Amino acid sequence: MKLFGLFESPNPRAAWRVPASSDAILFDRHAIKAHNIAYSDNLFAASTANNAKEVLEAYAIWGDEFPLHLDIPCVCALWDFGKSCFFVSRDPLGEIPIYYACDGNGVAFTDWLPSLLLSRICEPVMDSNALNELISIGPARTPGRTFVAGIHSLKPGCMLVGNAREPVSLVQYYSLHAEQHTDSETHTAEVVRALLEDAMKLYLSKPCALMLSGGLDSTLLTALAMKLDGIADTYSIEYENAKDHFTGSAFQPELDSPYVTLAVQSLKCRHRRVILTEDQLAESLEDAMQARGMPGMGDVDSSFLLFSRAISGHASRVISGECGDEVFGGYPWFRTEAPNITFFPWSGSMDLREMILLPKVREKLNPRRYAQERFDEAVSELPTLPEEPEHERLLRKIQNLCFMFFMPNLQERAYHMCRAAGLQIFTPYSYLPLVEYAYNIPWSMKFLKGYEKGLLREAARDLLPPDLLYRKKSPYPKTWNPEYMRLVSSQFEAIAQDRTSPLRQFIDFDAVRRFSRCASPAADPWFGQLMTAPQMLAYLIQTDQWMRTYGIELSL
């Protein structure tokens, strides 16, 4: 189900309408032709998960606080025809994306942005703000914003509320709160372990495969699966001939494969390796763009899509170690940037982001100022704790920025790539009780014994051998093969030679060529930990594909 609904009125017979131009199913309250739907008396609910009846029951008990009482993260819509009102909610931590557009007749909403474009509910236009999101912030986005003018992203912990008499309103029903943490180190590690086990029990209630990288996060979850179920089916991803080309960097210091082997041998799980070629990565860029519905993380997306497809041949549900770094402080910027953070630590060089723009567009957008304004706005909204030590306050700032900007981009990637492959993905590290508890653990404790995620390592001490327990942080892997750079350079050059390319309106092709010729795959990323020169080309390729596919027009 890609388009969840277009509200026109609280009339029950028009409660849920999908334009015929989209590929979703047309139905109303009395002609249900889709799954994940439930109704009783004057209530009608729909959900991205198979829990629509649970949504109705939660609403009957807790009213408009019902999203807080759902076990599984989901986007859900509920109509109360007796009160002539509706609710559209996103889960508290934003694991599942939702986009919406409003007009005088109501609100249209979806978990896949192109549904709104294909239905012609709103015009496919990028104005200066939307283009700035694409260039200055992207592939992440400012909470609430998208790459299309007139289409908004519903923020985590928020819901849309509407009725027959008033305009649709945005209501925040949940946010994390800063509180004093008084538990001892030992008790804190025990609570973290117990909460992780609770999350795994919830998701292992039905058969689940696990993504295994050999890193702390995924290996700990695999060990817990073996402890709780006695069996675990695991999958890892690697690239053909990776050893021949890997050079490593401060962000990705070593290959995953030796640690995957060690984890499989130590934990005795049943394992399959998924090996990808450079041709597959380059050829799947458009599929990944279509799955996400917009430009994303280039081959980081396409590899995840191919990985998910391989898993879906054997399983329908998968567990990932995503979000562990945000919750427990695994990223390098928690250790190196904290004393003087004044900008998004994952955004790389603003000089590079500005350089690829045509001079007149650069002057119009002023990307550096735009990004700084978004950063300053976000920081001004962050919760604080009175008398919190300065270093702790700065680290809390970075974590909140991760929750607002960086983590949603990764969650969106995981959700859409798995969804396109027919997989349902679960991320135990974003289990709400765990996040709420971990959020207020002092950073001196999170970095127990001087290790990043030291507290999490302590919680796993009896489950993993030392080489796995204390492996240095390494992100989701990218390819280091120069053949991939050659392939995306060739694709980009074809776009540059095409007089009809929409990128001609704002991209300086010569500047991109100059950068690409001298950039090293091991250079500092322009986004996150992985996205260097090849990934920037992939991002621009996906942008060209997206604008052509959906007729996106530029209006500066």
Image (spheres, rainbow, N blue to C red):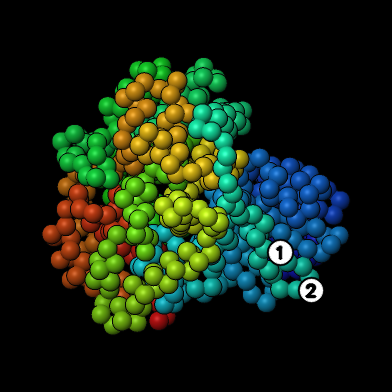
Q: Residue at x 62, y 47 (%)?
A: 74
Type of the residue with mark 2:
Arg
**Mark 1 crowd level (few <14, some 14–19, many ≥20, 10 Å Cα):** many
Residue in the picture at 28% in, 30% down? 257
Crowd rating for badge 2 (residues with CA inside 10 Å; few <14, some 14–19, many 20+): few
Q: Quadrant of the C terminus?
A: bottom left
Residue nearer the viewer, 464 or 338: 338
Front residue (pair 379, 166): 379
Q: Is residue 433 visible?
A: yes
**Residue sitting farthest toward the left:** 518
The image position of residue 192, as x and y in percent, is: 53, 33
Using the numbered discs, state the Cα–Cα distance from disc 1 to disc 2 in whole angstroms: 12 Å
Residue 532 figure quarter: bottom left
Question: Is 312 placed above or below 16 here?
Answer: above
Q: Which mark is residue 65?
A: none
Q: Residue at left 34%, top 59%? A: 340
Confirm whether residue 115 shows in the render: no
Q: Is residue 498 above or below residue 316?
A: below
| Mark 1, residue position | 161
Element type at marker 1? strand
In the rendered image, residue 164, in percent from the top left (x then y), is placed at 79, 70
On the picture, is 449 further left or further right than 94? Answer: left
Does residue 540 sit above or below 426 in this rendering? below
Q: Secondary structure at mark 2?
A: loop
Query: Is 209 situated left or right of 358 in this image?
Result: right
Residue 508 percent across, percent down from the top left: 23, 73
- Residue for point 69% across, 50% down: 67
Q: Nearer the viewer, residue 481 or 184?
A: 184
Q: Position of residue 514 (x, y in %)?
A: 15, 66
The residue indicated by pointer 2 is 165
Residue type at mark 1 is Val
